[in-house]
Amino acid sequence: MATKMHRYRSAVKTPSHGYCVATLIDDLTSNTLTIKIYSSDETKFVHDVSIPWPEARALLPSGGPDVDVDRLSLDKSKRGALYNALLQGFMATTTPPAPPSSTSFGPSSPVASPPTNDGVSAVALAVSSARSSYSSGSFPSCVDLCISAIKLCRAVYGQGENDVARDMYELMGDAYKMIGSRKHGRAANCYILCLKEGGGGEERVRSKLRDVGGAGVTDGEIESMLENHRLMGVEESWDFNCTGCGECCRTADNILLTPYDLFNLTRSTNIKMDTSKLRRDDKLGKSLKYMLKDDVPVCYLSPVNSGIGQCHFAYELVKVGGRLLDYTETMELKRKLEKEEEEYIPVTSDEYNLTEEEELEAIRGLEIEEGEEEEEDEKGKEEEGEEDDNCSSDGYRTDDQPHNSLPITVKNSYAKPALGCMLGVAGMPAMCAAYPIANESVWGDFWHGRDEEEEKKLDELQYGEEKRDGEGKKGGWVEREKFVLVKNEVCEGFFEKGREKTDAYYIDEGPEDHKEAEDNNPNKDNTVGDFLRSNTNLQAKEEEKAWFLTLHKKATKLKISDPDVRKTFVEHIARIWFNFDSLPTARNRPFKSWSRCKKVVQECTEVIIEQTEKFVETEEAERGGKGPVGMRYKELLKRLNL
């Protein structure tokens, strides 16, 4: 009879050995549970014990997974949750003995050889490296290593709550705190994610969160911060309904624009101009803001600093006959009204021939007619049981009447015009399309780059784990890692049901339209994965943003001491990234596809970084930085045709 068993591996923290590799073997034939714990390099046993399955029940916390289920019938995630609970219960009740220093594995070893090095041991080693980096005072390096360890956790263990991820978020927060007060905001983010990951040490982490939260921060404010954040896996659902209130288009500070964002923006239906024309445009050109991050340029939209009270790409939403007009229709209506206003000729005083008595009589007649109409309207409403209110029972504003042919500006709950985006959902920048969620790595370190080879290894590791269990396929880092949902009290999308909010996205044709529109809202009760794969093209935008941040990080490693060379380098790399349509390659053959544009941007960036690095080394070694360095550097770039 074949032996049936399941194996589960995890990184565990021990008092005397730090992070170790644990293997749990569930032998369903003998109904025995075996737990083997190795050192992080898998060269020494820390613990080895076998427990009859009935006794293993005592390891589970109250309210934990059911141990009496048929373990063969459990799917991967539920089985993993059961074994993880058993392993954590064992670690909480057992202190592994310190192994003799001479203990090693070899031909004469009385125990079996340790398992081969895989993702679990890689997690333990990554954790050890992060802690060593912190102990040595290399805090920026510690942040990078913590993120690497968390990414490994997601590939190996999936998206459930994880002790290693929780500890790494706490360590990352500690590293940010040690860097200085300018990083306390990032430290707070990490402590919040640590608490959201669950597990022990909550009071300790809350204390650290209070320390970086600023003077006078109260427990109530801490609770509010925690309540407004949620850490989610891609298959978790969330309740967010965009109402078109437009407050994010007014209050957003810095919205990063990547080359991919600019490509989509300039090719969108309502823009259709290359990056050179966009920069020169009298209105839209003012929307682009530039600044330096680590001496390397970045491009932003900044609605709050736009000077017009909203994003330059936003427009006021208008309804006619209860139907919401799109951008083209809205602009046509606006031009029509402006033309009518220009053609309007007011009555002059010599044409005004009513006497004062005739004017008063006409006004009284109008007032009587209006009063009779209002009484009839009120009577009709009472008979039909209608509410005399601008807010329907489900909370949506109803300030326009059905089938009214006059244009009505849609107002939000703050009595401001509701706003739409002329770029459309496909043309929105990644940060706009992703609102209100963000990838956990970016939330921990916004400028986090992604090494292509490292991500491939994580994909292979994740795919290998799934393939062994006959489940799933490659999903990439976007679907492997978690996302952070941040609640904004100002945003109507988070208003509870019944509270007054904008009703931009429904056609007022009948009494059921409010409910039907809310049920059909693309952001209603969907999963993070659904949101990523929606018509916003968000998954591609997130991947291209990660690509650009990696490119940006490479440029920040270039050290240029000469100010003229630095200035010229910044100007040229900004042109490559944010005005790529002006490059010689594009002038000869305009970019029609992003794949070709991306290839050119990548190649030009690598060339300018490589050649600049060589130039700087040559100038310092051979000439000592003397002479017209800036001029010689410009000549170099001219020869490179950049």
Image: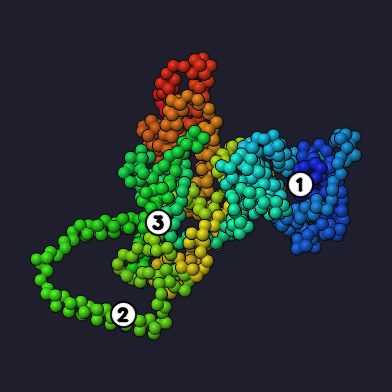
Task: Specify the quadrant of the image occupied by residue 78.
Answer: bottom right
Is residue 363 shown above or below 459? below
Q: Residue furthest toward the front?
A: 216
CB contact under 8 Å: marks 1 and 2: no
Q: In x, y percent, where is residue 334?
A: 29, 57
Q: Which quarter of the image is occupied by the C terminus?
A: top left
Is residue 109 shown above or below 476? above
Q: Which residue is mark 2?
A: 374
Instruction: Name the residue: 80% across, 45% down.
Output: 15
Q: Which residue is mark 3?
A: 420
Mark with earlier residue (1, 2): 1
CB contact under 8 Å: marks 3 and 2: no
Mark 1 to mark 3 CA distance (whole Å): 50 Å
Q: Which mark is residue 153?
A: none
Instruction: Name the residue: 64% across, 37% down.
Output: 139
Q: Is residue 590 left or right of residue 14?
A: left
Q: In x, y percent, where is residue 183?
A: 58, 43
Single out the mark in the foreground, 1 or 2.
2
Instruction: Name the residue: 63% across, 57% down.
Output: 219
Secondary structure state at the residue bearing disc 2: helix
Check disc 1 and give the amino acid type.
Val
Q: Tag 2: Cα neighbours inside 10 Å, few (<14), some, or many (≥20)? A: few
Single out the mark in the foreground, 3 or 2.
2
